[in-house]
Amino acid sequence: MEPVPTDLPAPGPPVPDLVALLALVAQGDQDAFAAVYDRVAGPVLGLVRSVLRDPAQSEEVAQEVLVEVWRRAAAYSPDRGTPMAWIMTLAHRRAVDRVRSAQAASDREHRAALLDHTPAYDEVTERVEARLEREQVRRCMGGLTERQRQSVTLAYYRGLTYREVAEVLALPLGTVKTRLRDGLIRLRDCLGVTA
């Protein structure tokens, strides 16, 4: 039988679990936050990267999540789940928010591009004004609400379809149709056109 070595180092203090570490982080303990960071940074980055697919944006969002953990550690409640589940929920939400933000920016650019590719106002109005007297049309257009005037201008002066008008104005298609119908009825009545 071999002798048991007596010169082994004494075991260190037990490593605190994430619940205890988050409680310390909530009190502003930077060392506790460093320990939380070391434990969760990899999984957070992995989750964010699986949502965003862009390495640079993933790193940025992962850092935002870890800053949020530092700021909101006091909001964590063990009754509602594990610390890792709470942190991963924060990461998933932040990643989805970034995707939605990027999609909204893309949609705005698309609407702006639609406006850039529509025919110039003067090209279309020349045909309309040839049939109706210019001043009467302007006066009647002035009698429309701003929303009706926008819809009519985009649809009839710029030649956009109802769906394109809805995209440009970021409104439901039904709302655009109603505005156009009401605006055209008011124009017809103002111009004295009989149906």
Image: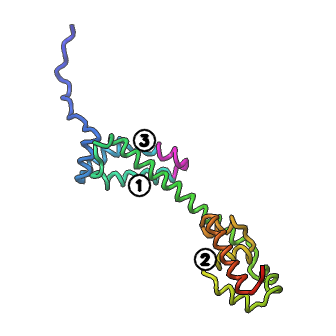
**Camera-side residue of 90 and 36:** 90
Position of residue 137 in the picture relative to residue 38 (left or right): right
Residue positioned 70% across, 72% down in the render: 116
* Secondary structure at numbered mark 2: helix
Please determine whether, in this image, residue 125 is positioned above or below residue 49. below
Q: Crowdedness of circle 3 by 10 Å Cα count: few (<14), some, many (20+)?
A: some
Q: Residue at x 70, y 82 (%)?
A: 187
User: For residue 5: magenta?
Assistant: no
Question: x and y percent of residue 2 in the render?
Answer: 21, 10
Q: Main secondary structure of the magenta part?
A: helix
Residue that numbered label 2 is attached to: 147
Q: Give the quarter of the figure containing the C terminus.
A: bottom right
C-alpha gap between disc 2 and disc 3: 49 Å
Q: Nearer the viewer, residue 119 or 148?
A: 148
First in residue order: circle 1 vs circle 2: 1
- The magenta segment: 46-56
Residue 85 in the image, given as x and y percentages of width and height? 37, 42
Sequence-wise, the earlier of marks 3 and 1 is 3
Looking at the rendered image, the disc whose residue lies closer to the viewer, 2 or 3, is 2
The residue at the point 53 percent across, 49 percent down is 52
Tell me the distance, in whole angstroms, between the alpha carbons under discs 3 and 1.
Answer: 14 Å
Q: Which residue is mark 1?
A: 64
Which residue ends up furthest to the front in the rendered image? 195
Q: Callout 3, which amino acid?
A: Pro
Which residue is located at x 40 percent, y 49 percent? Answer: 90
| Residue bearing mark 3 | 43
Disc nearest the viewer among 1 and 2: 2
Query: Considering depth in this image, is 151 or 180 the residue closer to the camera?
Result: 180
